[in-house]
Structure formats: structure tokens, C-alpha cells
Image (cartoon, grey):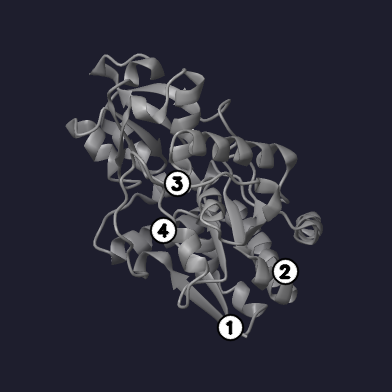
Amino acid sequence: MTVRVGYFPHNNSLFVLRHTGILERRLPDVEWVDLRELPSKPPVDPTNALPTLHSDWLFEDGGYDVIGTGFTPPITGLAHDRDLVYIGISGPRVENGRLVVKAESGIESVEDLRGKRVGIAHGSWQTTLLLFALDRAGLTWSDIVPVDTDVRAGGAELVSGTIDAWVGAYPGLADVEADHELRTLVETDGLFSHPSLWFTRRDFAESNSAQLRAVVEALQESDAWIETHPREAAQFFVDDVERRGGTASLDAWEAALRGRPFGINPVTEQFLDEQQRAADLLLANGLLPRSIRIRDAVVSEIGEFVAADRAAV
């Protein structure tokens, strides 16, 4: 059978795996689905909705069987009745990004964001970071003006004044830091663990356990290669940007990869508690259609073989 793997640069592990050929040595029939080339969905209003793009294509023809994303997408999928299950998580990525403003903005704290325009890639981990930060400060989603921004382009919007604050991530955040003084309002560290994560459909996991395990084993091998060859891995991202007519710094991408954890681990109780807290806050702030129980998306057998494969690396 053909195993369809969805990938894009924001999940570094799958993006590198796409270019190494490691998975193809385990599975004879792999179809790589570039998420950036799937038909686009209508834009969402970040004041009252979360997009379901990642989970939509997991359950639609022409989509994929396995996907890796940031923290928020599986929560959204579960809330829209997608029968997905977790595969595993990375270690904490607390150095990957944070909530920033321009130093001269006059904004000193999260409390000062009341009524301000805050840029996020809505529906990604950035939505969760901002919501956790607001909740800790005693604010709600309706107290700010959320603005849906591109992961990299949000920096230019912050500099131009289109937005007042931005949840930035590396390497895009490094581009802004090079030329502008920023003030950090909230570090990711201490707020939530911010892992990468991978998930699939329950029916795929139940019917194709050997293929799923092959994907996990290939990711473990590829991630180990990234850790020992970060500059070579960074070149894949630079080449991709340049093919699309842009420019990118090899040094910045290498630094970004060196600062991120690699390897897939089983989901933990701490992670599941964080996911549940995020789901409950998203619901309370009008960003989810219904309440969900995160632990319904856990399959113990998957955790067992992810743990075994991790120990074998």
C-alpha cells in the first residue's frame, strides 16, 4: 500500500526525512504530500475560530496518513470530530520562539496588550502560547486583537507597526533581532513545553501498524542524522527557500536546528495535561466548537513501540 506522509518546513524532522531517502529504504511505496501545495481553505477569523487544515487533509482523499505539526492542530482536529491518535512528541522546544514587542513600543508586559494587535500563525503552537500567556496575566482572547500572520512575515509586520506584538520563531525571529531591538514579554520556557508532535488516523494506526512503525523508525534515524549533521540538514531548508524565489541564511538555519530537540518520544502525562489545559482554554475563549477529552486520542500500543524504537537509537 502507498503511505502518504504530509510534510512542510515547520516540522523540521519530516522535512529533512523527505530529502534523505531514509524512509524509502523501509517502505517501497511512499507518497510525499507537500502541505503548501494542497488546495487552500478559506481564511479564518482569528477572533473566533481555529483553522482545521492539518486534520482536514488527514481525513480527505489526496491528503496524507501521517503528519507532524506543532502543539495546537490535533486539539482542533479532535474538537471537529476527527478520529486522530497521537504517535509521539519531541522534547521541549522552549528556545524556539517567544512573545516579543519592539523595545520602543512602550509595551512592558502582557497586561499592556489589552486592545493591542498581536500577530500569530493562527492555529499553530503560537495560538496556544499566546492564550497561555493571556490567561496567566488575567486576560482573555477578547481582550486583544489577534492578527493571523505568516510564520516569517510576521516579523516585518511588527517592524512596520502593522501589529503591536508578535509570537516569533527562529530562524525568522533572528532576522528581526539582527536589525531591531526587541523586548521579550513572555519566554516559552516556564509557560509550556512546546514540543513538535506527530499524529495519524485511528484506522490507519489499527490497520497499518508495520507501516506506522517504519515511519517512526525512519524518523528516529533521520533525526539522529540531523543532530550530527546540522549544517547539511540546514541546506535542505535554504535550498527550498531559494527554489521558491526567496533568500535564507545557512548559518541561521543551522543555529535554529542546533537549538531544537530531535527524536520521537511517547506522549507523557505532562504533555497530555498541557493539551487538555489548552483545549479547555480554547473552548472557554470561543475558539473550539465543543469540549474534548485529550486522552481519548492515546493508543497505548503506539507508545510502547515508540519507546522501544527510541531506546534502540
Residue at image mark 1: 2
> With respect to residue 69, does 270 lie above or below?
above
C-alpha distance separating marks 4 and 2: 26 Å
Judging depth in this view, the residue of 280 and 249 nearest the camera is 280
Residue that appears at 26% across and 14% down: 106
Q: Residue 194: horizontal and vertical position, in percent?
A: 56, 39
Residue that appears at 41% across and 58% down: 237
Judging depth in this view, the residue of 148 and 75 nearest the camera is 75
C-alpha distance separating marks 1 and 4: 26 Å
Three-letter amino acid code at the position of disc 3: Ser
C-alpha distance separating marks 3 and 4: 20 Å
For residue 124, the mark is: 3
Q: Secondary structure at mark 3?
A: loop
Q: Residue 271: horizontal and vertical position, in percent?
A: 66, 40
Tags 3 and 4 in contact by the CB under 8 Å rule? no
Tags 3 and 1 in contact by the CB under 8 Å rule? no
Is residue 187 visible in the rendered structure shown here? no
Mark earlier in primary sequence (2, 1): 1
Is residue 135 visible in the rendered structure shown here? yes
Mark earlier in primary sequence (1, 4): 1
Q: Residue 46: horizontal and vertical position, in percent?
A: 34, 42
- Quadrant holding the N terminus: bottom right
Mark earlier in primary sequence (3, 1): 1
Residue at image mark 2: 213
Residue that appears at 67% across and 42% down: 272
- Could you classify mark 4 by the number of other residues whose Cα lies within 10 Å: few (under 14), some (14-19), or many (20 or more)? many
213 horizontally vs 69: left or right: right
- Could you classify mark 3 by the number of other residues whose Cα lies within 10 Å: few (under 14), some (14-19), or many (20 or more)? some
